[in-house]
Amino acid sequence: MSMNRKTGFSLWPAVGDENAAVFAARQGFHAAVYCSIVTAIFAVLGGFGFHIMGFDLWCLTDAGLMAGLAFGIRRMSRVAAVIALLYYVACRIDLWVEYGFQTPIIAALFILMFLSAVRGTFAYHRFNAKTRRAARSLGFASGLSGDLATGRTI
């Protein structure tokens, strides 16, 4: 009951707290999973002889890379979120150069979803850092720093 926000899709989701940051990052995760699946399908179809914008079995490496980036975004990796955004934009530009300017609205939506992942992962780590600093200032142990707990537990 701490938040009063919609849980549906938003083009520019809020990242005002840790839960909202995770929600925003999930958009990039979903975009990366979708790109990975579609690329894999087109690659397999290309391997069977269907000619779809030059997709062939080598494109399975692209699908695997995007799946790995999706996994990284799911684990709230800032690096994975930034690479996924840059990789998607680079691939989209490459397709547009080779086959003409197609589906700009869909591309814009995916770019916004990957931007949400970047915003969400960075905000998540900012909130986590504040939480760790607050816990240390209260004398609680930080599981990441290896400090021993100073308080007694019952």
Image (cartoon, grey):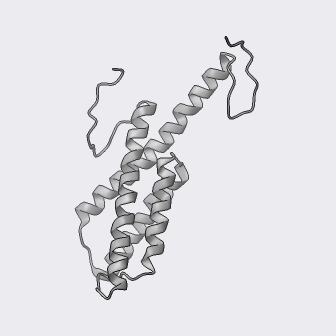
Given residues 5 and 11, the one toward you in this image is 5
State left or right for residue 16 relative to residue 139: left
Residue 119, position in %: x, y? Answer: 44, 44
The quadrant of the image that shows the N terminus is top left
Residue 137, position in %: x, y? Answer: 67, 18
Which residue lies most toward the bottom here?
A: 49
Q: Quadrant of residue 120?
A: top left
Which residue is found at the position 23% from the left and 68% from the top?
103
Given residues 135 and 149, the one toward you in this image is 149
Q: Quadrant of residue 129?
A: top right
Residue 153 lies, with reference to residue 101, above or below; the image says above
Which residue is found at the position 72% from the left and 13% from the top?
151
Which residue is found at the position 42% from the left and 33% from the top?
19
Residue 154, position in %: x, y? Answer: 67, 11
- Residue 134 visible in this rendered orientation of the protein: yes
Residue 7 lies, with reference to residue 69, above or below; the image says above
State left or right for residue 22 relative to residue 95: right
- Residue 54 visible in this rendered orientation of the protein: no
Which residue lies most toward the front here?
A: 154
Residue 117, position in %: x, y? Answer: 42, 48
Given residues 147 and 13, the one toward you in this image is 147
Which residue is found at the position 68% from the left and 28% from the top?
142
Residue 46 lies, with reference to residue 114, above or below; the image says below
